[in-house]
Image: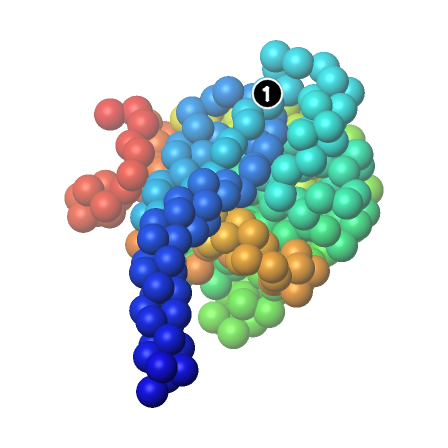
Amino acid sequence: MFIIYKNLRSLWHCGWILILLIPFCTWCFASTQAKIAVIFSSDIDPYQQSFKGFKAFFAEESTNSLVSEYYLERQPPGLIIRQILTENPNLVLAIGPQATMLADKEINKIPLIFSMILSYREFNNSNFTGVYLDVPARIKLEYIKKILPDTERIGVIYSSTSDPVFNKILIECNEMKYKLISRKVNSGKEFKDAFKDISEVIDSFLMIPDTRVYFSQSVKYLLLEGIRKKLPVIGLSSSYTKAGAFASLESDYYESGKKAGTIALRIINGTKPISIEPIEPIEPDHIKLSINLLVAERLGILIPSHIIEESSEVFGK
């Protein structure tokens, strides 16, 4: 009996010890923070909106994180990389194309997440995954059917860089009975001739993310010629619409940031980036339409009031 009583008494004491230790262990777990380094291509509002979405996801998941922010317009790239490698965070979030290219080139052993980049691209290491900003081809064509119902022939100019994007557009155009009129160029220097070649036989022009084709001069030429030839140009973001495109489609920056957060949490919990497929913005509620009423007027296009009301941004009022 004494032996049994002694064992029970020991168990009782052990139970109290465990109870006393629970708050301490919980505190230890809660104090463990995931270290995240964030590289911004610049301090523009869209990037900040994406970052807000990223932080909001972690807040909703009640996940502790210690975030370090680095801005390419404020610090030399080399210094940023050295600081990050010294910090050795759990992962690096690259926001924007310049930050993405830098991380891809200089960081090899830390998991990387890209965000706020438009197009598909090959990365130098298997540590990269993330969220694309470009809207899938199917959704773009559905919007064209909605805002430009008379369109039958769509023009596209692309290069080998954007082959994957072009191929998706071609497949969707065939399925939706659109005739795709395209020209493949080696660089933006060939853009003018390519556009002249197709502009007389298309009803609208669809821009696709390709830095080899689209830069300041080629975009300026396209927007001016689009108005002159009365061809509606569908751009890549509201900045293109504001500059003179008829309309643009883009994913919601805040929601894009939240999606990057879902990937980050999976990596923090042990999933390898190579096993995480990059995310595309496929939810209709997270797609933003911007339109330019002044351009529409010059093109002779009447936009229904319900489409104007549904648009996230309206220029030329």
Crowdedness near tag 1: few (<14), some (14–19) or many (≥20) residues, C-alpha within 10 Å: some
Task: Name the residue located 56 percent from the left edge and 37 percent from the top edge.
Answer: 36
Above or below, 291 against 282 in this view is above
Above or below, 293 against 302 in this view is above
Residue 44's x, y, as percent?
Answer: 48, 22
Quadrant location of residue 250? top left
Task: Name the residue located 74 percent from the left edge and 18 percent from the top edge.
Answer: 79
Residue 113's x, y, as percent?
Answer: 61, 45
Q: Which quarter of the rendered picture does the C terminus lie within?
A: top left
Q: Nearer the viewer, residue 213 or 46?
A: 46
Quadrant location of residue 246? top left
Q: Which quarter of the rendered picture does the N terminus lie within?
A: bottom left
Q: Residue furthest bottom?
A: 1
Q: Is residue 272 visible?
A: yes
Q: Please indicate whether residue 137 sits to the left or right of residue 109 in the image.
A: left
Which residue is identified by label 1? 71
Residue 301's x, y, as percent?
Answer: 32, 41
Q: Please indicate whether residue 159 sits to the left or right of residue 280 in the image.
A: right
Task: Name the residue located 60 percent from the left edge and 59 percent from the top edge.
Answer: 270
Q: Please indicate whether residue 221 sits to the left or right of residue 30 in the image.
A: right
Q: Nearer the viewer, residue 124 or 142?
A: 124
Task: Name the residue located 33 percent from the left edge and 79 percent from the top edge.
Answer: 5
